[in-house]
C-alpha cells in the first residue's frame, strides 16, 4: 500500500470557524458572478457547505501537490456550480485568490465551466451532467488495481440524477464492491426550469440509492458538522449522502428563488449579499 | 478477427500491468484465457455502455491503459457523448475496439450494423481511427494503439474473415500498406473489405487494368502524402469500405481532394448507401444487395477508368 496523503495545509479547528469559511466562500462566489455576469449562482451557493466540509475536514490532500498519486479525488459532477469549487480551491491554497478575478474572462485561467486541467485541483471537465460518477468509478477501480489507498468523492446535483448514466454507475459500484466511493447529492429541490419533483420522480432519493446497493443517509446539507460525520462514514458498500439544501443558500433574497439559476447580481445586490454574509 | 483481438490483448496484458479490459457483457468464453491470467484487470461492465466508457476514461486518467470492447454500435454511437467528453476532450489513452463492424452482424438488423461509426469517430479531435484488414492487422493495430498516447478507435470484423498477410507487415499508425502493386488504378480499401478489393483487382487484371491495392487502415490521421502520390499517379482511385459513402474513408478522401487543385485521378467512393438494411439475411447477402461485391467494385472502377480515358 502506498502511504496516504494527510492533510498538510492548516485547517481551522472549530465548527464556527468553518461557518466563517463558508461565508467567505459564498462572498467570493457572488462576487465572481457579479463581475463575470455568469449564471448558475444559486446552484453554486447550495453546495458550499458540502465543499467546505469535504475540503477542510475530509479529503486527504495537499494543495501544494494537486497531482499527488495517492490523493483523495474530488469531482464536482455538477459542473455548472464550478465557481463554488474555484472559490474553495483558492481559499484552501490550491492557487492564489487573485486568480478568481479571471473567472470567465477572455483568455483567463478559470473558464465559466472547467476545461481539462484548467486549474490545480480540478479533476474533471464537467458541465455535461452524468459524467462524474462513471469517471469517478474508473478512478476508484484504478486505486484497487494500483494498490493505492485513496477515496473518490463525487458531488451530483438532484437534476443530474435524471441522467441514466448516473444509475448505470450506481448499479455498477456495489457489483464491483467499490467501497472507496462517496456520492453526495446536492438536493436543492430545483433544476433549470422547475422543481425537481415536478420534472422527474426523484424522491425517495435515499431509498433509491439504498435499493441500488449503496449505504445512504439524509443529512442537512448546510450543517457542516453533520456533513463531516456523514462524509466520514465507511462500510463495505459505497456511500451516498442525500444532502438537503436550499438553492441560493446564504442570501435571503436568493434562497429558493429559481431566477437565481440564471441571474447574476448587480453591484447593489452584491453589496447587500456581502452585508448579509457579514463580510463588510 | 475477434479471436485475434482476444489473443493479442491477453498477450499484451501479461506484459503490461497497466492494461485493463472492459467488456459490455459480450464475448462469451472469448476472454477466458485473459481472465485466468489477469483476473483483477477484467471488468464485465454489463449492458451499460455510457458508464463503461466513463469508467475507461477514469482508469486512463489514473495512469492505466483501458481497452473497451463490445459490438461496434454499442461502443460508438451508444456512448458517443462519453467518448467525446470523457475520452477525447480530456485526450486520455482509451482504446475502443468495436467488433462486428459494418455488416458483420447483418442478420441481426440495423440495430447491430455500423455503417456510420467512422464518420462519427473521425470528427472527434484527438481520435485515431484504425480499420485493420485481417486478423494479422488486428493484432498489430492493438499493439500500436497501446503504444499510442491518446484515444484510438479500432474497428474489426467478427469471425471467419480471410487472412491477407502471410507474414507480419510493418504496421505504423498513419502508414498505408501496399498489398499489391499496379499501374492503372488504385483501390484504397479499409477494414474487412480488403479481401474483396483483392478479388476485384484480379477481375480488373483480366480486363486489362492493372490495380494497386492498399490496406488504408488509418482513416484518421489521413496520410495526405500518400494520397497526393496516388492521385498524381493513377487514372482513378476507389475507396472501398463496409461503411456509408457518407463520412467514412471515402468522405475523408473527398474532403482532402476538394481542398486541392484538380488531380490526375478521379475518385470513386464505394460503400453502403444512405439507407438502413431492412431485409433478413447474412453478411454476404447484404453485401450482394448493396453492391459490395468484387464484381461490382471491378465494374465501377472499370467504368470510371474508361471515362477517364475518353
Image (cartoon, coloured by chain):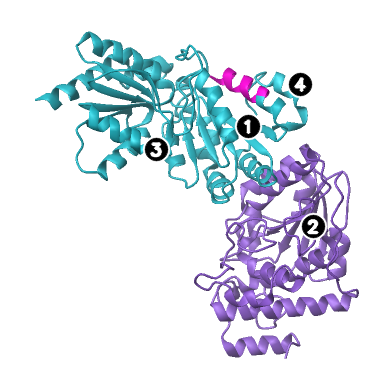
Q: For mark 2, does the 10 Å Cα neighbourhood hold few (<14), some (14 to 19), or many (20 or more) residues?
A: many
- A232 displayed left or right of B259: right
- B71 displayed left or right of B57: left
Residue at mark 1 to residue at mark 2: CA–CA distance:
29 Å
- Quadrant holding the C terminus of chain A: bottom right
Task: Report which residue position mark 4 lands on.
Answer: B36
Which quadrant of the figure has residue A211?
Answer: top right
Q: Are marks 2 and 3 in contact (CB under 8 Å)?
A: no
Q: In front: B66, or B51?
A: B66
Task: Report which residue position mark 3 lands on.
Answer: B222
Residue at mark 4 to residue at mark 3: CA–CA distance:
39 Å
User: Do discs 2 and 3 belong to a common subunit?
Assistant: no
Q: Chain of mark 2?
A: A
Q: Residue A11: give x, y in percent of width and height.
A: 86, 71
Visual hue assigned to chain A: purple
Circle 4 sits in a helix, a strand or a loop, which is it? helix
Task: Report which residue position mark 2 lands on.
Answer: A241
- B297 displayed left or right of B235: right
Q: Residue A28: give x, y in percent of width and height.
A: 68, 79
Q: Residue A169: give x, y in percent of width and height.
A: 69, 44
Q: For mark 4, does the 10 Å Cα neighbourhood hold few (<14), some (14 to 19), or many (20 or more) residues?
A: few
Which numbered circle lies on residue B24?
Answer: 1
Q: Which residues are magenta?
A: B1-11
Which numbered circle lies on residue A259?
Answer: none
Amino acid at each position: 500500500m502506498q502511504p496516504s496523503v494527510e492533510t498538510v495545509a492548516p485547517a481551522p479547528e472549530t465548527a464556527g470557524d468553518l461557518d466563517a469559511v463558508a461565508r467567505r466562500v459564498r462572498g467570493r462566489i457572488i462576487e465572481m458572478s457579479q463581475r463575470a455576469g455568469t449564471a448558475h449562482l444559486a446552484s453554486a451557493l447550495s453546495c458550499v457547505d458540502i465543499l467546505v466540509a469535504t475540503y477542510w475536514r475530509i479529503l486527504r490532500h495537499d494543495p501544494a501537490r494537486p497531482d499527488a498519486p495517492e490523493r483523495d479525488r474530488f469531482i464536482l459532477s455538477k459542473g455548472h456550480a464550478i465557481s463554488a469549487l474555484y472559490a474553495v480551491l483558492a481559499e484552501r491554497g490550491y492557487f492564489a485568490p487573485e486568480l478568481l478575478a479571471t473567472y470567465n474572462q477572455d483568455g483567463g485561467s478559470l473558464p465559466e465551466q472547467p476545461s481539462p486541467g484548467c486549474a490545480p485541483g480540478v479533476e474533471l471537465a464537467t458541465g455535461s451532467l452524468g459524467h462524474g460518477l462513471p469517471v469517478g468509478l474508473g478512478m476508484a477501480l484504478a486505486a484497487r488495481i494500483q494498490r493505492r489507498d485513496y477515496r473518490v468523492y463525487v458531488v451530483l446535483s438532484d437534476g443530474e440524477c435524471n441522467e441514466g448514466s448516473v444509475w448505470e454507475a450506481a448499479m455498477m459500484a456495489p457489483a464491483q464492491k467499490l467501497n472507496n466511493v462517496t456520492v453526495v447529492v446536492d438536493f436543492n429541490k430545483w433544476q433549470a426550469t422547475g422543481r425537481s419533483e415536478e420534472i422527474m420522480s426523484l424522491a425517495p432519493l435515499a431509498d433509491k440509492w439504498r435499493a441500488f446497493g449503496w449505504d445512504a443517509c439524509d443529512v442537512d446539507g448546510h450543517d457542516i458538522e453533520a456533513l463531516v460525520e456523514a462524509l466520514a462514514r465507511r462500510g463495505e458498500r459505497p456511500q451516498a449522502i442525500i444532502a438537503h439544501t436550499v438553492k441560493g443558500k446564504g442570501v435571503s433574497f436568493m434562497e429558493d428563488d429559481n431566477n437565481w439559476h440564471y441571474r447574476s447580481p448587480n453591484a447593489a445586490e452584491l453589496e447587500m449579499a456581502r452585508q448579509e454574509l457579514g463580510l463588510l | 478477427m475477434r479471436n485475434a483481438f482476444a489473443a493479442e490483448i491477453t498477450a499484451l496484458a501479461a506484459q503490461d500491468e497497466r492494461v485493463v479490459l472492459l467488456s459490455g457483457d459480450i464475448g462469451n468464453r472469448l476472454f477466458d484465457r485473459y481472465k485466468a491470467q489477469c483476473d483483477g484487470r477484467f471488468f464485465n461492465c454489463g449492458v451499460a455502455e455510457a458508464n463503461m466508457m466513463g469508467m475507461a476514461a477514469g482508469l486512463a486518467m489514473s495512469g492505466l491503459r483501458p481497452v473497451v470492447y463490445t459490438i461496434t454500435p454499442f461502443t460508438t454511437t451508444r456512448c458517443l457523448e462519453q467518448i467525446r467528453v470523457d475520452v477525447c476532450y480530456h485526450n486520455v489513452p482509451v482504446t475502443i475496439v468495436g467488433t462486428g463492424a459494418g455488416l458483420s452482424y447483418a442478420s441481426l438488423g440495423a440495430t447491430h450494423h455500423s455503417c456510420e461509426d467512422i464518420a462519427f469517430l473521425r470528427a472527434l479531435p484527438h481520435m485515431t481511427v484504425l480499420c485493420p484488414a485481417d486478423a494479422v492487422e488486428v493484432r498489430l493495430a492493438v499493439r500500436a494503439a497501446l503504444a499510442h498516447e491518446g484515444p484510438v478507435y479500432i474497428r474489426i470484423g467478427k469471425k471467419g474473415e480471410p487472412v491477407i498477410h502471410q507474414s507480419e507487415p510493418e504496421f505504423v499508425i498513419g502508414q498505408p500498406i501496399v498489398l499489391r502493386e499496379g499501374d492503372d488504378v488504385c483501390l484504397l480499401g479499409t477494414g474487412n473489405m480488403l479481401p474483396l478489393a483483392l478479388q476485384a483487382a484480379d477481375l480488373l487484371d483480366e480486363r486489362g487494368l492493372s490495380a494497386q491495392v492498399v490496406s488504408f487502415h488509418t482513416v484518421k490521421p489521413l496520410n495526405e502524402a500518400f494520397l497526393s502520390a496516388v492521385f498524381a499517379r493513377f487514372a482513378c482511385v476507389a475507396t472501398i469500405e463496409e461503411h456509408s459513402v457518407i463520412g467514412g474513408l471515402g468522405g475523408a478522401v473527398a474532403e482532402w481532394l476538394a481542398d486541392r487543385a484538380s488531380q490526375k485521378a478521379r475518385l470513386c467512393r464505394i460503400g453502403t448507401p444512405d439507407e438502413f438494411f431492412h431485409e433478413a439475411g447474412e453478411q454476404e447477402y447484404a453485401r450482394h444487395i448493396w453492391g459490395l461485391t468484387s464484381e461490382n467494385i471491378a465494374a465501377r472502377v472499370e467504368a470510371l477508368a474508361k471515362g477517364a480515358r475518353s
